[in-house]
Image: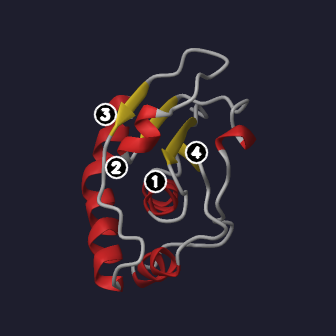
């Protein structure tokens, strides 16, 4: 059974929530899911708090960088998850029909490490089971 599903986590800046979601999904569901993330208006870099929160949980951070949705539009996506309201409203049309779901999370950008950790834990608690269920894993 080598049917790995590709999940695109979409946000506005692709610097906090979507990056943490990409790392968490790849870690927790990596044998069945390939998670990617992108932004509608990506920031220049991943937020330091997001990197610190991931490292504090022992999650890998290598290879994380903000990407524009245009860079991934031709990927074979099985599920798009928007994690902020702005990305939900501006989610692009994909070349083929792709199931979408909206699972919003607080934006910790500019806040304390504790805020990033709370969002990281919320992503792990809510997003992983939702993706698992949506993809029937």
Q: Using the image, tell me which numbered label, if any, was put on residue 40.
A: 4
State which mark lies toward you, 1 or 4: 4
Dot 1 or dot 2: first in sequence order is: 1
* Whether residue 8 is situated above or below residue 98 in the rendered picture: below
Dot 2 or dot 3: first in sequence order is: 2
Which residue corresponds to mark 2? 128
Q: Using the image, tell me which numbered label, if any, was put on residue 41.
A: none
Dot 3 or dot 4: first in sequence order is: 4
Contact between labelled residues 4 and 1, with CB atoms less than 8 Å apart: no
Q: Using the image, tell me which numbered label, if any, was put on residue 133.
A: 3
Q: CA distance from mark 1 to mark 4?
A: 20 Å
Q: CA distance from mark 1 to mark 2?
A: 6 Å
Q: Position of residue 1 (x, y in %)?
A: 56, 32
* Whether residue 84 is situated above or below residue 52 in the rendered picture: above
Contact between labelled residues 2 and 1, with CB atoms less than 8 Å apart: yes
- Disc 4 packing (10 Å; few <14; some 14–19; many ≥20): many
State which mark lies toward you, 3 or 4: 4
SS for callout 3: helix
SS for callout 1: helix
Which residue corresponds to mark 1? 25
């Amino acid at each position: 059974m080598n049917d790995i599903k590709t999940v695109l986590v979409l946000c506005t800046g692709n610097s906090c929530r979507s990056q943490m979601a990409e790392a968490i999904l790849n870690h927790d569901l990596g044998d069945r899911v390939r998670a990617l993330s992108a932004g509608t208006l990506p920031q220049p870099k991943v937020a330091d708090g997001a990197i610190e929160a991931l490292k504090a949980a022992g999650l890998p951070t290598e290879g994380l960088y903000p990407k524009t949705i245009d860079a991934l539009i031709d990927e074979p996506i099985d599920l798009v998850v928007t994690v902020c309201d702005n990305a939900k409203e501006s989610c692009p049309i994909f070349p083929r029909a792709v199931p979408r779901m909206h699972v919003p999370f607080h934006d910790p950008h500019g806040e304390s490490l504790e805020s990033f950790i709370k969002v990281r834990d919320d992503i792990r608690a809510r997003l992983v089971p939702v993706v698992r269920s949506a993809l029937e894993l």
